[in-house]
């Protein structure tokens, strides 16, 4: 009979660590565990370097549940049959080994050790959670069949445009810039800010259409056909929209609701098409303050690799594309979307220019992403 997977609780973790472990547990690399969906769990992963209530740890130690405690320098917890420690930066194979060890202990089984890095390409080919298939596509290997490659290029161009890369010595780089005040996504954020400031719903009126924001539910609402919406998101606005507060949103049952972040993200990508807001310095450092919740957002190739790089290194938009050896339009489109949500900013510091050493070509993409985040 097949053993049940462990239920893992992620507690006392910063957002970056929690989100990355969330993706890891959902991936096909973690075969013997799932995320706990209620208050019942078998294994808790926590970070000793974050301040926490000692009672929380005591309660865990006193229960029959297992603990994996992360630490970076000092480890002030004694290990036993139920408590394990793992030093940061996290090595993905060590993490999987510990999870398998807990699984074997709980169910009195022996799990086959994690495959070596030389076999990880095979691991990536196995089926993954369908709800996260778009994340898999975002980090899929470059070596794909020719017909699929054409298909992926077409889909990618739909999101990131077709701009060619610019060089450092190019005098005219105007093609990479857009005036954000001429596009819808800029005003969606204004709608949200006005609603939050006044604790009221808001309405945005263009020359022909209206969009509503429900500040209690944190959603946008619209009554537009798919092609009408796409045109409004991607085209320069004829006139500046009028934004105002309203007491109620009538006929909302006949409108399409969409999460606020998802709508701003989607709309900024449609406007960007490989461009960034005017006056953005492509040679200064990108500082990422939040990881996007990619499980809920529109994702295209290289998104996760770019974020992993930004989370670890002080690097510019220009050098990001150079370091990852990818077209600049992917970097610029992601920057525009994250900038629209306030997830990053450009600092005044200079970018690193040296090539960052990468792991073996045989190491899995998920291993590299986790190494970037925890490194």
Image (spheres, helix red, strand yellow):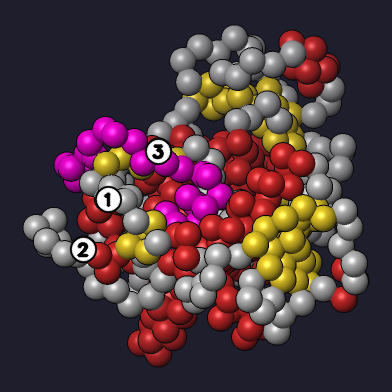
User: According to the image, label 2 marks what residue?
Assistant: 173
Say above or below: 278 vs 152.
above
Q: Would you say residue 336 sits in the magenta stretch?
A: yes
Which disc number belongs to residue 287?
A: 3
Q: Quadrant of residue 21?
A: top right
Vertical relation: 210 (above or below) 106: below
Q: Secondary structure at mark 1?
A: loop
Q: Earlier in the sequence, mark 2 or mark 1?
A: 2
Q: CA distance from mark 3 to mark 2?
A: 23 Å
Disc 1 and disc 3 in contact, CB within 8 angstroms:
no
Quarter of the image for the N terminus: give it: bottom right
Whether residue 282 appears in this view of the structure is yes
- In the picture as drawn, the residue positioned furthest to the bottom comes out as 147
Nearer to me, 17 or 341:
341
Q: Residues within 10 Å of mark 3 (few under 14, many from 20)?
A: some
Pointer 1: residues within 10 angstroms few (<14), some, or many (20+)?
some
Nearer-the-camera pick, 306 or 234: 234
202 is higher (above) or lower (below) than 79 = below
- In the visual, does 20 lie left or right of 42? left
Please tell me whether mark 2 sits on a helix, a strand or a loop: loop
Left/right of residue 277 with respect to residue 71 in the rendered view: left
**Quarter location, residue 284:** top left
Q: Position of residue 166 (x, y in %)?
A: 19, 64
Q: Secondary structure at mark 3?
A: strand
Who is closer to the viewer here, 301 or 274?
Answer: 274
Q: Earlier in the sequence, mark 3 or mark 2?
A: 2
| Residue placed furthest toward the left | 169
Magenta range: 330-357
């Amino acid at each position: 009979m097949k053993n049940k997977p462990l239920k893992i609780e992620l507690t006392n973790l910063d957002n970056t660590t929690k989100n990355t472990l969330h993706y890891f547990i959902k991936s096909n690399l973690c075969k013997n565990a799932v995320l706990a969906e209620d208050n019942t769990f078998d294994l808790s992963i926590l970070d000793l370097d974050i301040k926490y209530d000692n009672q929380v740890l005591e309660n865990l130690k006193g229960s029959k549940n297992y603990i994996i405690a992360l630490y970076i320098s000092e480890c002030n917890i004694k290990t036993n049959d139920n408590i394990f420690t793992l030093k940061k930066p996290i090595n993905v194979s060590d993490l999987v080994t510990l999870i398998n060890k807990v699984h074997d202990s709980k169910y009195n089984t022996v799990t086959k050790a994690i495959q070596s890095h030389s076999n990880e390409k095979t691991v990536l080919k196995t089926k993954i959670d369908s709800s996260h298939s778009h994340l898999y596509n975002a980090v899929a290997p470059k070596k794909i069949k020719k017909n699929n490659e054409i298909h992926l290029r077409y889909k990618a161009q739909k999101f990131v445009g077709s701009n060619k890369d610019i060089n450092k010595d190019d005098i005219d780089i105007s093609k990479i810039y857009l005036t954000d005040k001429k596009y819808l996504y800029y005003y969606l954020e204004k709608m949200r800010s006005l609603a939050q400031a006044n604790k009221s719903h808001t309405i945005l009126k263009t020359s022909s259409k209206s969009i509503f924001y429900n500040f209690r539910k944190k959603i946008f609402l619209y009554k537009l056909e798919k092609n009408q919406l796409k045109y409004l998101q991607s085209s320069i606005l004829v006139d500046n929209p009028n934004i105002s507060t309203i007491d109620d949103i009538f006929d909302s049952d006949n409108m399409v609701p969409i999460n606020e972040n998802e709508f701003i993200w989607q709309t900024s990508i449609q406007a960007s098409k490989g461009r960034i807001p005017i006056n953005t310095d492509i040679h200064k450092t990108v500082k990422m303050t939040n990881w996007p919740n990619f499980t809920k957002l529109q994702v295209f190739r290289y998104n996760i690799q770019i974020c992993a790089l930004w989370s670890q290194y002080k690097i510019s938009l220009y050098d990001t594309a150079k370091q990852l050896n990818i077209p600049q339009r992917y970097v610029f489109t992601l920057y525009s979307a994250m900038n629209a949500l306030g997830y990053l900013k450009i600092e005044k510091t200079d970018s690193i220019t040296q090539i960052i050493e990468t792991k073996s070509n045989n190491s899995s993409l998920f291993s590299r992403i986790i190494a970037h985040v925890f490194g």
